[in-house]
Amino acid sequence: MDDDLLLLDRLRNEIIDIAALNAPLEREALRNHLVSRDLADIARRLESGTAQRSERFAWPDASREEAETGFLAMLARHRRIITLEAELRAAERALAEDMSEENWARLQAIHAQLERSERLEGAVDELNGQEGSGRAAR
């Protein structure tokens, strides 16, 4: 496993531990906890990362409502893309096994859904004043 992945795994586990203890997850308290666990460097890197600059809900001055709404919207986009990509792989396999009109239409429909999703994501970024949010291109 890559060093950054190990650090992120440690970070995730620490945040889960804090939440399990019903400790506050406010910015300063979380940062102090992470510093006490020798995770100051990864916390600093995450605070200065592109997600915080590009996603308004991750900005330090975002309200709780903005943060929650933005996080849930990003999670929904992620789940939708993951689901569509899984459907795309299944459609590609089906077409490889049976070159039927039905399987071809299904593959084309999934491609169209992915394209619409990417255009919608770009439009949302534009509305938010973000010239590319740093999301991975497919």
Image (spheres, rainbow, N blue to C red):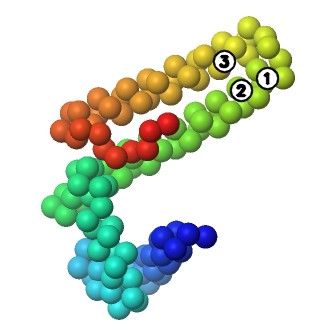
What SS does tag 3 mark?
A: helix
Q: Amino acid at mark 1?
A: Ala
Q: Which is more toward the observer, 125 or 23? A: 125
The N terminus: image quadrant: bottom right
In the foreground, 69 or 6: 6
Q: Earlier in the sequence, mark 3 or mark 1?
A: 1
- Disc 1: which residue: 96
As shown in the figure, which amino acid type bears the numbered disc 2?
Glu
Mark seen at residue 55: none
Question: Which numbered disc flags the more N-terminal residue, 2 or 3?
Answer: 2
Residue, disc 3? 106
- Contact? badges 1 and 2 (CB < 8 Å): yes
Give the Cα separation between the discs numbered 2 and 3. Answer: 9 Å
Contact, CB < 8 Å: mark 2 with mark 3? no
Q: Residue at x 58, y 23 (%)?
A: 110
Residue occupying the point 50% across, 27% down? 114
SS at circle 1: helix
Q: Is residue 8 left or right of residue 42?
A: right
Query: Which of label 3 and label 1 is nearer to you?
Result: 1
Q: Position of residue 12 (x, y in %)?
A: 47, 72
